[in-house]
Image (tube, rainbow, N blue to C red):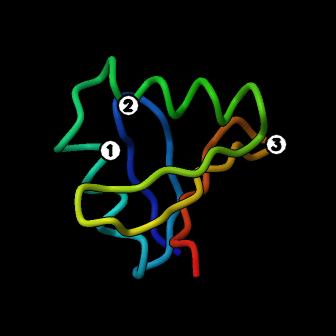
């Protein structure tokens, strides 16, 4: 498992979810990305799709970090 920070949020992810990390970090500005982080915090997880129609789920962990996984 890898770890990075996206717009100030600690995100853990597997290699197959890197394109989701790239999307949140580089394709969206911080206000756009914060919508996903806020929803994951509010609902515990939120699905989203990147520009290439790949599906991901962003979940909030009990320690306040987030987990990003590619939806199968």
Q: Is residue 57 above or below residue 33?
A: below
Measure how far apart labels 1 and 3 are at the Cα level.
21 Å
Along the line of sight, the residue nearer the viewer: 49 or 28? 49
Which quarter of the picture shows residue 19? Answer: bottom left
Residue at the image position 70 percent from the left and 43 percent from the top: 60
Residue most toward the left? 26
What SS does tag 1 mark?
A: helix
Check disc 1: other Cα within 10 Å, few if <14, some if 14-19, many if 20+.
many
- The quarter of the picture where residue 17 lies is bottom left
Q: CA distance from mark 1 to mark 2?
A: 6 Å
- Residue that carries the numbered disc 3 in the rendered image: 62
Q: Nearer the viewer, mark 1 or mark 3?
A: 1
Q: Residue at x 37, y 31 (%)?
A: 33
Which residue is label 1 attached to? Answer: 24
Is 57 or 5 nearer to us in this picture? 57
67 left or right of 48?
right
| 52 is higher (above) or lower (below) than 64 | below
Q: Give the label, 2 or 3, closer to the camera.
A: 2
**Rendered view: 53 above or below 41:** below
User: Outermost residue toward the right?
Assistant: 62
Judged left or right of residue 58, residue 33 is left
Task: Give the residue displayed 38% in from the left and 43% down from the top.
Answer: 5
Q: What number is the disc on residue 33? A: 2
For marks 2 and 3, the one nearer the N-term is 2
Sequence-wise, which precedes: disc 1 or disc 3?
Answer: 1
- Sequence-earlier tag: 1 or 2: 1
Please indicate whether residue 2 sits to the left or right of residue 72 in the image: left
């Amino acid at each position: 498992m890898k770890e990075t920070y996206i717009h100030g949020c600690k995100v853990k992810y597997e290699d197959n979810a890197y394109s989701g990390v790239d999307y949140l970090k580089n394709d969206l500005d911080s206000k756009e990305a914060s919508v996903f982080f806020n929803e994951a915090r509010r609902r515990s997880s939120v699905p989203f799709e990147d520009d290439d129609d790949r599906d991901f789920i962003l979940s909030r962990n009990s320690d306040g970090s987030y987990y990003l996984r590619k939806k199968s």
